[in-house]
Image (tube, helix red, strand yellow):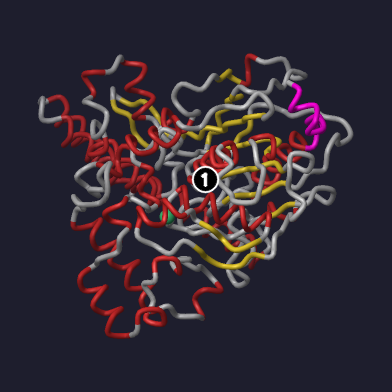
Amino acid sequence: MVLSMWFVFAFAAIVYGAGYSRQCCYGLLLLLVFMLSIARSSFRLLSDWIHHFGEMRYSKDFELKKPHVRKKWDVGDPKNLYPIVLVHGVFGWGTEQMLAPSYWAGAESLDAQARILSPSIGPVSSAHDRAVELFYKLKGGKVDYGDDHSKECGHARFGEECEGLHSTWSEEHPVHFIGHSYGGNTILMLHHLLAEKFFPGHDTNPAWIKSVTTIASPVNGIPFFSSRFWGFSHHGFKRLSVLGLLGTRLLHLIAFLDLTGPKAFIDLRFDHWGLSWRQRGVLGGLQSLLRHDWAAFDSGDFCMDVNVVSTQRLMRAVAISPHVYYYSFTQKLTVDFLGFVLPSPRMMPALVVHCGLSILFGFPASLGGPDEHDHATLREWLHSDGVVPIRGQRCPEGHPFVESASLPDSDTPKGIWIVDEIESDHLGIAGLPWDLGQHHKFYGDLYQNCKALSPSPSSQHLRNK
Ligand SMILES: [Zn+2]
């Protein structure tokens, strides 16, 4: 293994020295990183296995250093105990998936004081549909996607009947939201819908939210998804690549089969699209499957609205509120090497591949080409956590932000994003977190921070402002 790695490295150096194409050299270096990542992961798994079953550690020093949280939250007694709502990302799940392991690696039960909620919402639905589902999961009632929206996108207006995890939700009883990956986009879309008073019968406003925390959320989009590799275009899905087509066709097939058992692990929540044989009948469902006439492909009402153009259009509509605290944790696990941006060998092997492909094929789709950006901006689009570029994660373009490190510890302003960086890959802190010691500390500190924020003033007070 070591010899073959050195062979790849030496060959890459020769190719680079001989002036062959940068892509060829990059591919070889990527292969080297992938092999290192595989070796490292295997070693770690073996080490954990020995530790677990043999009660001995192969090497006590071999510990992943992720995620590392730079800022130390230092707070006293809780000032509020508003519910904290964890919002999962694409292909994620909440506590309703009884047989699935925790998406948050147990972070739902880390705090004995606070009420931590983790509802399940559409794992591949659009930000709009997920935000609406999230509202009714908390407030209760029949999910209403909106008359105009449902007509425009071609799905049913109403969804499931929800009991309401926080039925007293209001300006006086707000919630803290913490979103991982696309969960952050979902929260911001809900923030917008609350401001627009979208939900019939509910006099909402952004002050229903006490704080928003996004973790590696693609709030400015992911260029790779609209590259020729996947082909998810900015307006619908008419340019799907073979891979994009296979992936969406597989989802369509799962929705058609509508098997009850696997829903205990993950539920696609496609009922409003009516793709199941139970809703269309076997023949009707098969015809739909063969034609692949899922209306999401024309309307863009799908999680891949995370491409740069669609996301920035959606996020531009989100008006930052002076009553809400905003925190953004960006993640990065890439390095500069010989003038290239490479994934770190500490990244999960599958993400190494994704990271490399997104650098090779992802830029400049949607962004006008690397030559049109200054060096610093270009680096922000190339460095990533394996899935979302740094520039995609920070906060919606145009929103005010400040680096956490530049703030005094006691200063937590509202109406401005406070940005911090974590050294981790995309699944290091939610989804498939490995290092639970660091993971628990991160969420413990996060909950402490939420509880330390001043209670909301009365609704009358807000109206007078
Ligand atoms: Zn929809």
Say which residue label 1 marks.
186
Q: Position of residue 289 (x, y in %)?
A: 26, 73
Q: Is residue 118 visible?
A: yes
Badge 1 amino acid: Thr
Identified at 21% across, 30% down, the residue is 13
Horizontal side, residue 133 vs residue 153: left or right: right
Q: Where is residue 266 in the image (x, y as percent from the top left)?
A: 51, 68
Q: In which quarter of the image is residue 339?
A: top left
Looking at this view, is 27 or 42 the one in front?
27
Within 10 Å of the Cα at label 1, are there few (<14), some (14-19), or many (20+) other Cα atoms? many
Residue lying furthest bottom in this view?
Answer: 282
Instruction: Return the x and y of residue 401 as percentages of the image width and height.
Output: 55, 20
128 left or right of 297 in image: right
Side of 463 relative to 357 (left or right): right
- Residue 270, given in percent of the width and then of the height, sits at 43, 66
Q: Which residue is drawn at 55% across and 42% down?
A: 193
- Helix, strand or loop status at disc 1: helix
Q: In which quarter of the image is ligand 1?
A: bottom left
Q: Which of 86 and 65 is in front in this view?
A: 86
Q: Check the image and report above or below for 453 versus 257.
A: above
Where residue 225 sits, quadrant-wise, is top left
Toward the right, the furthest residue is: 77
Q: What stretch is highlighted in magenta?
A: 451-464
Indicate whether residue 455 is drawn in magenta. Answer: yes
In the foreground, 91 or 163? 163
The residue under the point 49% across, 28% down is 394
In which image quadrant can residue 275 be found? Answer: bottom left
Q: Where is 45 relative to 29, above or below?
A: below
Can residue 163 be found in the magenta stretch?
no
| Label 1, ligand 1: CB separation under 8 Å | no
